[in-house]
Image (spheres, helix red, strand yellow):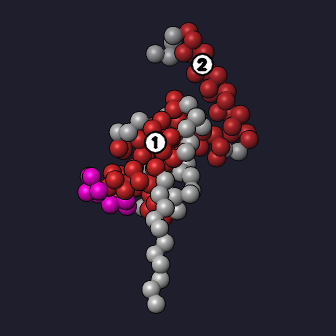
Amino acid sequence: MYRKRRPIVTSPLTQWLLDYVDQYDVSLTELSMHAGLSSGSLRALVKFPERLPTLETCMKLATVTGKPPDEIFQMAGLSGATPTAALNPERLSLLRVYDSLSAPLRQALIQVVHILEQLNETGTGQ
């Protein structure tokens, strides 16, 4: 008895990923690594297309492929989620650092930021 094969389900993002790796003759693992993602993250998106990628994953894909971030957000079903400017990799890094700090260290960081703001406003920080 033959088993019916399940139809392959794709999302616009997973279809684009599959087309991209075919076009550039690169594996999903290689693309993941070039983007700075874990080796299996893109493979997981293809295997489970109903899962939404994180905004950071989309930004890293945009950086490595040269595709505009807003197009990747739209393909991933995340359009309108966050302005692209808010997802600058350095900004995300600062947010991760802030989130990892204890409350007293967060307050110290905020004080440093206020000093930097004052230096920037007076033009002495250039």
Q: Nearer the viewer, residue 20 or 117?
A: 20
Residue at the spot x=62%, y=26% of the render? 113
Q: Quadrant of residue 64?
A: top left
What residue is rendered at 48% in x and 44% in y? 75
Looking at the picture, tell me which residue is in the foreground, 2 or 94: 2
Q: Quadrant of residue 18?
A: bottom left
Residue type highlighted by circle 1: Ile
Magenta-tinted stretch: 22-29
Disc 1/disc 2 C-alpha distance (Å): 34 Å
Pointer 1 local density, CA inside 10 Å: few below 14, some 14–19, many at least 20: many
* Left or right placement of residue 117 versus residue 9 in this view: right
Residue 19 drawn above or below residue 59? below
- Magenta-drawn stretch contains 99: no
Q: Is residue 78 visible?
A: yes
Across and down, in percent, residue 1 comes to 46, 90
Q: Amino acid type of disc 2?
A: Glu
> Could you tell which of marks 1 and 2 lies nearer the N-terminus?
1
The dot on residue 105 is none
What residue lies at 62% left-to-right and 21% top-to-bottom?
A: 115
Pick the residue in front: 103 or 47.
Answer: 47
Residue linked to disc 1? 72
- Report crowding for label 2: few under 14, some 14 to 19, many 20 or more residues within 10 A (C-alpha): few
Q: Provide residue 35's location: percent of width, then percent of height.
A: 39, 49
Q: Nearer the viewer, mark 1 or mark 2?
A: 1
Left or right: where 124 falls relative to 61: right
In percent of the image, x 50 and y 41: which residue is there?
Answer: 73
123 w.r.t. 38: above or below: above
- Classify mark 1: helix, strand or loop: helix
Q: Which mark is residue 117?
A: 2
Residue 24 falls inside the magenta stretch? yes
> Which residue is at the front of the view, 79 or 98?
79
